Image: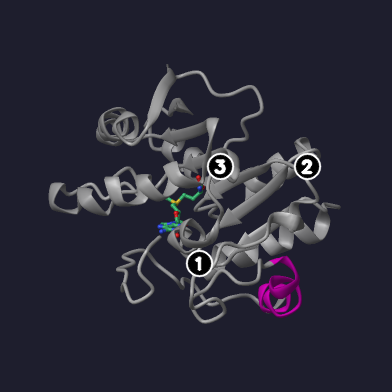
Amino acid sequence: MTEVTERRNFYGRIRGKTLRASQKTYLAEGLEPLSLPDVTREANPSRAAIDLAFTGGRPLWLEIGFGGGEHLVHMADRHRDRFLLGCEPFVNGIAMLLGKVREADLDNLAIHPGDVRDLFDVLPDGAAEKAFLNYPDPWPKARHHRRRFVTPGYLAGLARVMAKGGEFRVATDIPDYVRQTREEVPAAGFDLVSDGAEPWSDWLSTRYEQKALREGRPPHYLTFRKR
Ligand SMILES: C[S@@+](CC[C@H](N)C(=O)[O-])C[C@H]1O[C@@H](n2cnc3c(N)ncnc32)[C@H](O)[C@@H]1O
């Protein structure tokens, strides 16, 4: 378990453009009911493992950095017999997700409006059957590659919370991210299952994928199985 006193650097954006009035309403009304309790350090300073009763016995799927939430909501809608847990620290993305959730009728979705490492602290061992990492921040400069998700610190947390045989999916448009993913993920306890230009049968293209396609960068999809 991570030491409670550890301070973590987060280099991404937490806030963006001014929120629209409707988005402020979504946050005021929708965030708390959808957020898992006992995940933050303030709420759970001893970092005790959380109870998975909220899933209603459904296998847990985890989305890391859900952005605007389109893939997360799509997966929850498509897989009603699974429980989707998404995390995202960017408040504008969270507001977008909340807008989508209002239009959907879902009882199998929760979020942590923050860093995925908070979840890695408190999820029980082997809790997740599946995990999604869609278009992670690319950090293109070589000196920033260690900020990428596919580095040993993040991956050790993921490996601990993944069930044996669980599936980890990575989508990216950055060739050097593919390279690092191929190197680092197997070293963290996963076997490569597939690697190429063909998306998964239940894939929903995300905002970042659409941007990559518009700008001429082809998507790449990798699937790993936890050993
Ligand atoms: C390039 S965006 C992709 C968003 C979305 N998955 C998509 O495909 O459109 C990467 C996202 O990862 C989020 N992110 C970065 N570091 C994170 C962390 N430590 N925990 C959770 N989310 C993180 C960012 O806030 C950002 O929204």
Residue matched to label 3: 206
Q: Residue at point 72% right, 66% down?
A: 34
Of 110 and 165, the residue lying toward us = 165
Q: Which residue type does callout 2 highlight? A: Asp
Residue matched to label 1: 114
Q: Is mark 3 within 8 Å of ligand 1?
A: yes
Q: Is mark 1 within 8 Å of ligand 1?
A: yes
Tell me the crowding category of disc 3: few under 14, some 14 to 19, or many 20 or more residues within 10 angstroms, Cα based: some
Name the secondary structure under disc 3. loop
Q: Is residue 204 visible?
A: yes
Q: What whole-number distance in Å separates the C-alpha atoms at marks 2 and 1?
A: 23 Å
Residue 77, numbered circle: 2
Q: Residue furthest left?
A: 143
Q: Is residue 196 visible?
A: no
Q: Residue at point 82% right, 52% down?
A: 106
Q: Which residue type does callout 3 highlight? A: Thr
- Vertical position of residue 126 compared to residue 23: above or below: above
Of 53 and 66, the residue lying toward us = 53
Q: Earlier in the sequence, mark 2 or mark 1?
A: 2
> Magenta stretch mostly in which secondary structure?
helix
Instruction: Confirm or deny contact between disc 3 and disc 2 (CB under 8 A).
Output: no
Residue 57, numbered circle: none
Instruction: Confirm or deny contact between disc 1 and disc 3 (CB under 8 A).
Output: no
Q: Earlier in the sequence, mark 1 or mark 3?
A: 1
Q: Residue at point 82% right, 53% down?
A: 107
Q: What whole-number distance in Å separates the C-alpha atoms at marks 3 and 2?
A: 15 Å
